[in-house]
Amino acid sequence: MNVAFDRAHRGYPDRPIAGAPQGGDWAHVRFIHDLSRQLAGSLNVRRTVFRALDFAVPYLGAWGMLAFFDADSVSVYSHERDGRVSGPTSLGRLDPAHGLGRFRRRGHTERYTSPPDDVEAVLEELLPSDSLRKAAAAHRPTSALGVALNIGGATNGVLVVIRDGGRGYTDSDVVAAEEFALRVAATLESARLYEERGQLTEAMEESLRPPELPEYPGVRIAARYRPGAQRLRIGGDFYDVHGDADDFTVVIGDVCGKGIDAAMFTGLARQTIRTAAFFDRSPAAVLKAMNEVLRAQLVHRFITVACVRFHRSTGQDELTATMAVAGHPAPLVLRADGAVEEPTVTGTVAGIIAGLSFTETEVQLRDGDTVLLYTDGVDEARGREGFFGHERLRVLLPEYARAGPATLCEAVEQRVLEHLDGAAHDDIALIAVQNGT
């Protein structure tokens, strides 16, 4: 709603109600009440400041400014000559000797009236730029009021308003302005915390979401990821690919839990595996090192992982896949002719027992053969007909032989979602590697 129209519609005049400062405290009460309604639930810093200044002017004065402190700098919102709010304008470092610095140190209220005060000199001291001083001077101010915005024992900003026409600020006006500053400071603090939390979540998601897949000559790699918590883009499942074109490692895993809490550990697991593989690319050695490192970190949690090393000898067309698992479903091998094989490889979940060892098995991949790694969000997806199950997955694969890893992963994900039929699900992750181009 247009603020000016809303103010007129509710009976606000262009200037404060005549006599209100002396006998009309009810007008101030109504002003604060309407301000609270406008600010209620606002979680956008800029919008909150704009609404607050639109309420401050003209009720508290003919012109207004809200200055905010950030470390040693100051930013300002203010009214332009046409009455519109502008900002934020960053004015850089705040000189400790500047008048605004006094408010920051003391967190108090100051009012001035001409005479006896020199209001022009006061504004010269309080307004931190020539453009602000010109905008205020255009109203020929005869009084000024500065109120600190205090919250949590700190002063985060200052409200400066001016009046013209010889009207000064009474004790009742000061009380209203201080209440205004208190409401605005509290609302802005909530909005800032909300925005900061959003930025933190976005940064965390950026660092924890599945990585971009590398491109290696002679192989095709694709993946799909769908978190169980739909409002997030991260979860407890993860995958990763690292290494060189003729010797690279693919891992997929599942940290016990969901959402941000579990996702925090997926980043740790991914980095631990990358570090272990740098020293020894053997899947069994990688899982052993991961178990020892994460055991102290995964308090009351465990992690399942499938790790596959893909190695091609010089001049060879075949790709050797060496596999090891820690409590995770074994990868499936889809041959170019549609045959589905499940290598025999097992291992204990990681993160609980010290000193675990893991076994390995090798599979030779000819041209068009594909290895599919997946998490239990696939086979344990539960719909009206029960679990999706391992057998459904095996039956599905042959029709996608030689279809390409991207098509295969997308098809599996789609079949699982159809099986779920809208039901809630765990995180789903798939990654496929195909020999050949």
Image (cartoon, rainbow, N blue to C red):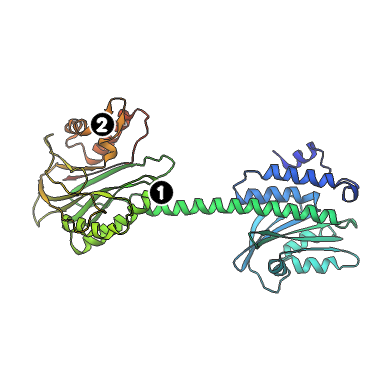
- Could you say where residue 255 lies in the image, as x and y percent from the top left? 31, 48
Q: Quadrant of the C terminus?
A: top left
Residue drawn at point x = 25 percent, y = 35 percent? 379
| Residue 373 shows in this picture | yes
In this view, the residue farthest toward the bottom is 97
Q: Quadrant of the N terminus?
A: top right
Q: 360 or 78: which is nearer to us?
A: 360
- Could you say where residue 86 lies in the image, as x and y percent from the top left? 68, 53
**Which amino acid type corresponds to the residue marked 2 in the rendered image?**
Phe
| Residue 244 shows in this picture | no
Q: 355 or 335: which is nearer to us?
A: 355
Where 177 falls versus 14 (above or below)? below
Q: 345 or 408: which is nearer to us?
A: 345
Q: Return the residue at label 2.
A: 388
Residue 89: which disc?
none
**Which amino acid type corresponds to the residue marked 1 in the rendered image?**
Ile
Residue 248 relative to residue 427: left or right: left
In this view, the residue farthest toward the top is 385
Q: Return the residue at label 1.
A: 260
- Could you say where residue 135 lies in the image, as x and y percent from the top left? 77, 59
Marker count (numbered): 2
Label 2 crowding class (10 Å Cα cut-off): few <14, some 14-19, many 20+?
many
Where 313 falls versus 389 (above or below)? below
Quadrant housing residue 391? top left
CA gap between label 1 and label 2 equals 26 Å
Residue 86 relative to residue 141: left or right: left
Q: Earlier in the sequence, mark 1 or mark 2?
A: 1
Residue 290 relative to residue 19: left or right: left
Q: 236 or 279: which is nearer to us?
A: 236
Q: Secondary structure at mark 2?
A: loop
- Could you say where residue 208 lies in the image, as x and y percent from the top left? 37, 52
